[in-house]
Image (cartoon, rainbow, N blue to C red):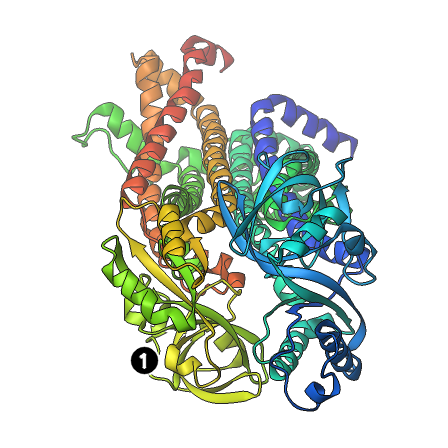
């Protein structure tokens, strides 16, 4: 053991640069692997920890206090009594009769569709407004203040809205219904099930005075917030559907909104899923490069130290001992680098956490996680150990006498790929080609590195083109339909509204695109997009298979949900709304992530088989020079009392998607920086190994009159064939497989097919840049040739 440690110390002392390069590469792989494991194993578990800590609900329903549409015995039993008490009693009875219910609570709140400025745009959701004290004292689904102040009047906002523009003491403008209200921010709170615009509803806590003022103004409906804990959280969607069905059956015209544990736990961690997927892929790629480099270094070590290996074998060292010495050496380096990589991941994690919180809205307490560190060590050490064992087996096949002669292959002239006496190529180019064709292990390392870097480069270009520079393709894929403005009107004013739109020269196109919820009988609630004529919508790629529904008995179903339920195009599906049911024929599959893959499309006539539309949302495309906000204000004024709500769709989409743009910007920047670092260290190791193996050849060439500059360029050119061919092949192959791979990352959003545009120009420029960078780095690393002096080599011999 002592002799092995002596040899290891000797090897490390003679190869300090190589060891440092290996440590950096393993550090990168360990850092990304540990970061990925932290995100995938613990970060999302933070949702469950907060859910338990706040004793949060599994199903949330906010229902307006309006029993005017109630039918049957329930109507007779509470005639003339308070409407709010009637709804509470009815829902309470439903919940108590269901054996899945563990506990529930109900609170008086106000509810209305609301908007607020967020991330440079707007966010739209259903505001659930309640008194701060009531929110903190709820037995189920309570809130917890994260930041408080001494201000006595104002609002408390969810953590997700804590940005540079929104802070304690600042004024924030809330649009409640059609009314703008300026409030002072008193603090921020955490609510697991209603603390984000991604939850279907967003809780807003208010001081006593602020709540009473809004209640007196009547900007929002008096409502009841119902929070339910159930025995099995996996049944949250089914329970939500049951409760919504009961409410809509008994109160046909009442407004309600709801969410479930299954929906919220996914929707609040979209950025975590994307980031975790990208980091895991990068960790795998870097690990693969590390293994190839380790294998190449071991083979180079055997060739470089052939005489020493022969001496050690002649002295009595067994092959197993020499292999064990290499195993200890590389495992020691791996353990050290993995520890440093884990430390680096914890250093970077606060920045990653800040990006995640901007989308999750749930605070995360950074703490040491032994399991990810242990898994990282086990995976890296196992992979490196296997690589060392496979690569070092060559030691067993080397007899001591051959090792003392520097190996039989050194004296073999059977593989003279470029005979210098017969070639017509310039001498420097011919020598470069000889080096290229004789260095199989170098070429293999370069090819693997460039192929993997080409894949991540194509992914970076894809995100740059379709998310960062122009987010429209990403929105078309994820959001579905977008337009300039959306105007919600009373159904009775439809004819007058359309006449106004037809007369307005600024309106290029107007079409019905309304959203409602229907229930799949025996399944989940589906977010339904209703359109009079789907040929008018802007995004004709919503349907990825089959066609849009055309008749009242047809519908298009989200492909993710269809696969989960086993539906095919042409199958029948039963939908219900309240007490009405109807059977529809599936005409096509869609992929929209607005409801995480639980969506469908219906014609207007198809929806009216289930129920009538009391309000209608029309989308409109406006002329390029029209300011959307001014247009919306003018339409609201011209049709006063008939327009319920107007939305600047671009502002809403930008506000929601800004967090993904910033996330992708950081990811792409990190990938490009990481690619440069990998190229630098891999080429450093390869050039160093080549100069060490061919030191005598370089000495002879210098003695023959070759200058250092010529030899540097010759060495750099010897890497170029492998670099160029693998880069071109990698870019071409990656361009064909990148969309399917991206769809894998986005599968939890309901995306199964990606149609992102491949940026050919960017890839060509980036590929050329990668080749030029590799050549420049190879030249820089080859400057060590100037230290080679022919006289000193002859004296050593």
Q: Secondary structure at mark 1?
A: loop
The residue depicted at 43 percent of the width and 8 percent of the height is 791
Instruction: Tell me if residue 569 can be seen.
Output: no
Task: Point out the image quarter for the N terminus.
Answer: top right
What x and y, as percent, mark residue 770?
36, 34
Q: Residue at x 34, y 42 (%)?
A: 727
Q: Is residue 318 above or below residue 304?
A: below
Please count the marks in the image: 1
* Depth check, front residue: 364 or 402: 364
Horizontal and vertical percent position of residue 700 = 36, 17
Q: Residue at x 25, y 29 (%)?
A: 430
Q: Is residue 28 shown above or below 77?
A: above
Q: Residue 41 or 63: which is nearer the viewer?
A: 63
Asked whether residue 704 is in view, the answer is yes
Mark 1 residue crowding within 10 angstroms, few (<14) / some (14–19) / many (20+): many
779 versus 503 height, above or below:
above
Residue 526 location, x and y as percent?
A: 52, 74
Looking at this view, name the residue that lies furthest to the bottom. 73
Circle 1 residue: 550
Q: What is the x, y in percent for residue 542?
A: 37, 66
Q: Is residue 561 above or below residue 368?
A: below
Which quarter of the picture shows residue 290? top right
């Amino acid at each position: 053991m002592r002799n092995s440690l002596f040899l290891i110390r000797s090897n490390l002392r003679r190869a300090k640069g190589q060891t440092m390069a290996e440590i950096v590469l393993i550090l990168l792989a360990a850092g990304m692997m540990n970061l990925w494991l932290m995100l995938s194993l613990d970060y999302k578990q933070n949702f469950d920890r907060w859910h338990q800590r706040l004793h949060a609900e599994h199903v949330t329903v906010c229902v307006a206090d309006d029993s005017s549409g109630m039918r049957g015995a329930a109507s007779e039993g509470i005639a003339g009594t308070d409407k709010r008490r009637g709804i509470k009693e009815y829902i309470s009875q439903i919940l108590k009769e269901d054996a899945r219910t563990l506990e529930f609570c109900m609170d008086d709140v106000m509810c209305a569709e609301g908007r607020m400025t967020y991330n440079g745009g707007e966010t739209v959701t259903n505001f659930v407004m309640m008194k701060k004290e009531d929110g903190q004292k709820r037995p189920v689904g309570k809130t917890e203040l994260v930041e408080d102040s001494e201000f006595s009047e104002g609002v408390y906002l969810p953590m997700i809205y804590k940005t540079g523009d929104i802070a304690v003491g600042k004024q924030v403008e809330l649009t409640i219904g059609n009314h703008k209200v300026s409030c002072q921010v008193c603090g921020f709170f955490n609510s697991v099930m209603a603390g984000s615009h991604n939850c279907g509803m967003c809780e807003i806590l208010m001081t006593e005075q602020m709540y009473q003022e809004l209640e007196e103004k009547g900007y929002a409906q008096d409502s009841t917030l119902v929070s339910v804990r159930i025995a099995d959280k996996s049944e949250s969607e089914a329970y939500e559907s049951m409760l919504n069905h009961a409410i809509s059956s008994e109160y046909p015209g009442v407004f309600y909104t709801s969410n479930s544990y299954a929906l919220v736990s996914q929707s609040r961690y979209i950025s975590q899923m994307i980031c975790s997927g990208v980091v895991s892929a990068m960790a795998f790629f870097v690990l693969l490069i590390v293994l190839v480099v380790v294998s190449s270094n071991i083979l180079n070590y055997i060739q470089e130290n052939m005489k020493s290996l022969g001496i050690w074998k002649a002295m009595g060292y067994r092959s197993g001992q020499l292999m064990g010495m290499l195993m200890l050496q590389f495992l020691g380096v791996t353990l050290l680098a993995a520890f440093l990589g884990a430390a680096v991941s914890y250093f970077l994690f606060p920045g990653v956490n800040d990006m995640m919180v901007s989308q999750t809205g749930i605070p995360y307490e950074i703490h040491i996680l032994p399991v990810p560190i242990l898994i990282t060590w086990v995976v890296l050490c196992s992979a490196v150990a296997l690589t060392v064992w496979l690569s070092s087996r060559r030691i067993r096949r080397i007899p001591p006498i051959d090792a003392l002669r520097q190996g039989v292959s050194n004296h073999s002239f059977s593989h003279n790929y470029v005979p210098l006496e017969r070639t017509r190529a310039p001498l420097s180019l011919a020598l470069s080609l000889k080096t290229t064709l004789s260095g199989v292990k170098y070429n293999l390392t370069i090819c693997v590195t460039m192929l993997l870097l080409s894949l991540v480069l194509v992914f970076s270009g894809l995100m740059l083109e379709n998310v960062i520079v122009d987010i429209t393709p990403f929105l078309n894929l994820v959001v579905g339909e977008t337009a300039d403005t959306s105007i919600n009107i009373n159904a009775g004013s439809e004819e007058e509204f359309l006449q106004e739109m037809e007369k307005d020269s600024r309106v290029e196109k107007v079409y019905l695109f309304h959203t409602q919820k229907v229930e799949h009988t025996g399944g989940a609630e589906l977010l339904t997009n209703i359109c009079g004529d789907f040929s008018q919508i802007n995004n004709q790629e919503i349907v990825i298979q089959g066609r849009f529904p055309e008749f009242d008995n047809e519908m298009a179903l989200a492909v993710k949900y269809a696969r989960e339920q086993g539906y095919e195009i042409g199958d029948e599906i039963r939908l219900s709304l309240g007490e009405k049911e109807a059977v529809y024929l599936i005409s096509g599959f869609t992929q929209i992530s607005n409801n995480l893959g639980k969506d469908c499309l219906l014609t207007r006539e198809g929806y009216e088989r289930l129920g009538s539309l009391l309000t209608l949302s029309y989308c409109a495309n406006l002329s390029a020079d029209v300011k959307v906000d001014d247009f919306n204000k003018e339409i609201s004024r011209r049709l006063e009392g008939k327009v319920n709500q107007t939305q600047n769709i671009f502002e809403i989409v930008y506000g929601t998607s800004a967090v993904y743009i910033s996330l992708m910007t950081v990811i792409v920047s990190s990938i490009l920086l990481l690619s440069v670092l990998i190229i630098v260290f891999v080429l450093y190791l390869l050039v160093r190994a080549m100069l060490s193996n061919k030191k005598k050849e370089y000495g002879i060439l210098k003695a023959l009159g070759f200058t250092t500059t010529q030899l540097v360029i010759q060495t750099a050119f010897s890497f170029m064939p492998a670099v160029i061919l693998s880069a071109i092949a990698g870019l071409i192959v990656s361009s064909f497989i990148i969309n399917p791979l991206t769809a894998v990352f986005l599968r939890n959003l309901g995306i199964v097919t990606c149609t992102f545009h491949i940026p050919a120009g960017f890839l060509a420029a980036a590929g050329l840049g990668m080749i030029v960078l590799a050549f420049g780095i190879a030249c820089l690393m080859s400057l060590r040739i100037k230290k080679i002096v022919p006289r000193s080599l002859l004296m050593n011999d």
